């Protein structure tokens, strides 16, 4: 694939295939059918589609025509947890409803073969391809399984440069975790700036009783089950 457009078309085809398998497996494990779903939360950051993948899957899988759709783009690593939080909010408001959360990421499509930078090599080695689906049911549905006790959102201001995307004109979108570049800098103001922010974030987490995992938690959501 030589262009971003080609890679994105491959993302759409594969996201539909993997997404249907993930949702079908989750429904089967819960003893439910496609028509039982009242809400659909879809998250991804490795491709774009309009209509979104959830809309395409409604046609492909024959889901209810009045299902409530919430496609979410741009949350990165934390998207699955954030979507589960939003699904929990939904079934709390509609306790007789069942929601599905679907996450699809095809990180291999973002590989920049000509880029031998430390940031690109590490991100290419850390992030892979896959799909996962979760069924979130309201209290009146009578389903068994882990319970979501509470959710909370924590946002860290002025951390947007820590991790994100640079879109390449000649190939697929590039996942560019700037924190890797900062970690490997031996000197300079950016390295000192990161270290200061890391210490501040760590102190904030300890006060809130949350395990600190680094600047990738920018705008993060955590849930307790």
Image (cartoon, helix red, strand yellow):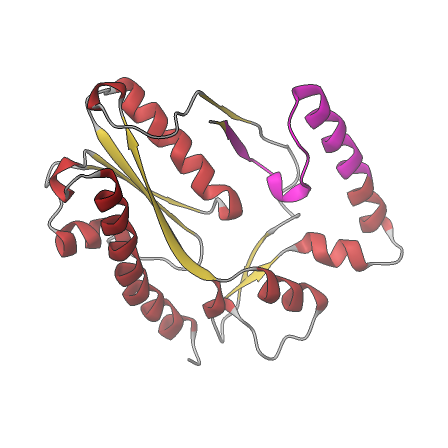
- In the picture as drawn, the residue positioned furthest to the right comes out as 187
Q: For residue 76, say whether it is visible.
A: yes
Left or right placement of residue 14 versus residue 124 in this view? left
207 part of magenta stretch: yes
Q: Is residue 83 above or below residue 8?
A: above
Left or right placement of residue 102 versus residue 179 in this view? left
- Residue at (76%, 54%) from the top-left corner? 182
Q: In this view, does 23 lie above or below 32?
A: below
- Residue at (58%, 30%) from the top-left corner? 155
Left or right placement of residue 140 versus residue 219 in this view? left
Residue 27: give x, y in percent of width and height: 23, 43
Left or right placement of residue 79 versus residue 42 in this view? right
Q: Is residue 24 above or below residue 220?
A: below
| The N terminus, quarter of image | bottom left
Q: In which quarter of the image is residue 32?
A: top left
- Residue at (62%, 44%) from the top-left corner? 216
Residue 10: give x, y in percent of width and height: 34, 70
210 part of magenta stretch: yes
Between 38 and 53, the residue placed more toward the observer is 38
- Residue at (66%, 22%) from the top-left corner? 209
Q: In which quarter of the image is residue 99?
A: top left
Number of numbered discs on residues: 0
Q: In this view, does 41 lie above or below 4?
A: above
Residue 181: give x, y in percent of width and height: 74, 58
Between 189 and 121, the residue placed more toward the observer is 121
Magenta residues span 196-223
Q: For residue 52, say whether it is visible.
A: no
Residue 205: give x, y in percent of width and height: 69, 27
């Amino acid at each position: 694939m030589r262009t971003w457009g080609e890679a994105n078309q491959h993302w759409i085809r594969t996201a539909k295939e993997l997404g249907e398998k993930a949702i079908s497996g989750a429904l089967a494990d819960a003893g439910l059918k496609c028509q039982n779903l009242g809400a659909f939360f879809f998250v991804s950051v490795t491709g774009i589609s309009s209509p979104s993948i959830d809309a395409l899957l409604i046609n492909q899988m024959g889901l209810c025509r009045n299902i409530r759709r919430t496609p979410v783009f741009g949350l990165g690593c934390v998207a699955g947890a954030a979507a589960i939080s939003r699904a929990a909010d939904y079934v709390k408001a509609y306790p007789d409803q069942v929601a599905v959360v679907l996450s699809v990421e095809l990180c291999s499509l973002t590989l920049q073969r000509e880029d031998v930078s430390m940031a690109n090599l590490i991100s290419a080695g850390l992030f892979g391809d896959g799909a996962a689906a979760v069924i979130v049911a309201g209290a009146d549905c009578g389903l068994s399984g882990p319970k979501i006790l509470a959710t909370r959102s924590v946002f860290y201001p002025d951390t947007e440069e820590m991790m994100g995307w640079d879109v390449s004109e000649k190939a697929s979108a590039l996942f560019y975790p700037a924190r890797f570049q900062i970690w490997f800098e031996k000197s300079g103001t950016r390295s000192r700036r990161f270290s200061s922010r890391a210490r501040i974030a760590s102190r904030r987490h300890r006060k809130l009783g949350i395990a600190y995992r680094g600047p990738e938690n920018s705008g993060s959501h955590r849930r307790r089950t």
